[in-house]
């Protein structure tokens, strides 16, 4: 019995460790921020695209091309690939970085960095106006309404450039609600 329990524990640990290197399974296609921009740049509706465009999230990919990024990768022991090609860096700097090619629409652009779909999920199936007008239908089609915990998947101490993250301080800097839907 102890032998079986030991084997079971070993198998569970192996599955757990392998899950970290596995690609995410995407059910919806990434379309890129330019698709979101069409409906989300109206000042009257909150200019969500403009808020994102002015945020540091827009420059997340660009930061990977800097000397500072190379030093951070070295510090983290992840210098085996350049930061702009390194999964350890891309996971927090590019939406859809690990999606297979067939899950990337022709307008998808990894240089958009932490774009709309990084927080709200791949948008192909919920981006249609008829779907977006029904919040529950949009959620059924892949829309994610992010929570504090979602931010913490990247804003955490795993980052070699970690700075304390206080959601209540940083959220107002990127808040982009639509005042017409409240």
Image: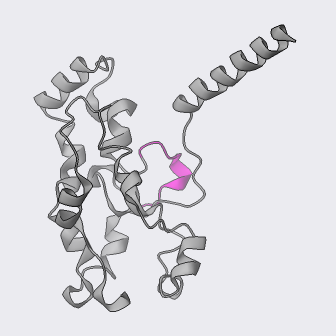
How far across and how far down the image is residue 97, in percent?
Answer: 41, 44
How far across and how far down the image is residue 126, in percent?
Answer: 51, 74
Q: Which residues are magenta?
A: 97-107
Q: Is residue 154 above or below residue 103?
A: above
Residue at point 34%, 82% (across, down)? 39
Q: Is residue 113 visible?
A: yes
On the image, which quarter does residue 4 sit in?
A: top right
Residue with the most extreme right position: 1
Residue at point 40%, 52% (across, down)? 149
Residue at point 19%, 44% (across, down)? 62
Residue with the most extreme front position: 2
Q: Is residue 5 above or below residue 136?
A: above
On the image, which quarter does residue 44 sit in?
A: bottom left
Q: Is residue 109 above or below residue 172?
A: above
Whether residue 103 sits left or right of residue 11 in the image: it is left
Q: Quadrant of the C terminus?
A: bottom left
Residue with the most extreme left position: 67
**Viewer-closest of 59 and 44:** 44
Whether residue 8 sits left or right of residue 102 in the image: it is right
Q: Magenta residues: mostly which secondary structure? A: loop
How far across and how far down the image is residue 87, in percent?
Answer: 39, 32
Q: How many marks?
A: 0
Q: How is the image coloured?
A: one colour
Q: Quadrant of the N terminus?
A: top right
How far across and how far down the image is residue 148, in percent?
Answer: 36, 56
């Amino acid at each position: 019995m102890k032998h079986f329990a030991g084997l079971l524990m070993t198998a569970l640990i192996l599955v757990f460790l392998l899950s970290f290197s596995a690609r995410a399974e995407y059910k919806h296609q990434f379309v890129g921020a330019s698709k979101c921009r069409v409906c989300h740049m109206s000042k009257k509706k909150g200019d969500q695209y403009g808020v994102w465009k002015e945020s540091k999230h827009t420059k997340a990919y660009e930061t990977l091309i800097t000397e500072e990024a190379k030093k951070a990768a070295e510090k983290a022991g992840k210098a085996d690939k350049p930061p702009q090609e390194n999964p350890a860096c891309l996971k927090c700097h590019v939406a859809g970085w690990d999606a297979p090619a067939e899950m990337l629409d022709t307008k998808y652009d990894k240089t958009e960095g932490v774009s709309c779909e990084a927080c709200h999920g791949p948008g192909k199936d919920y981006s249609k106006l008829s779907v977006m007008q029904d919040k529950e239908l949009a959620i059924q089609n892949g829309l994610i309404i992010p929570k504090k915990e979602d931010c913490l998947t990247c804003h955490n101490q795993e980052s070699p450039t970690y700075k304390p993250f206080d959601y209540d301080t940083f959220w107002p800097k990127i808040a982009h609600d639509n005042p017409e839907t409240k």
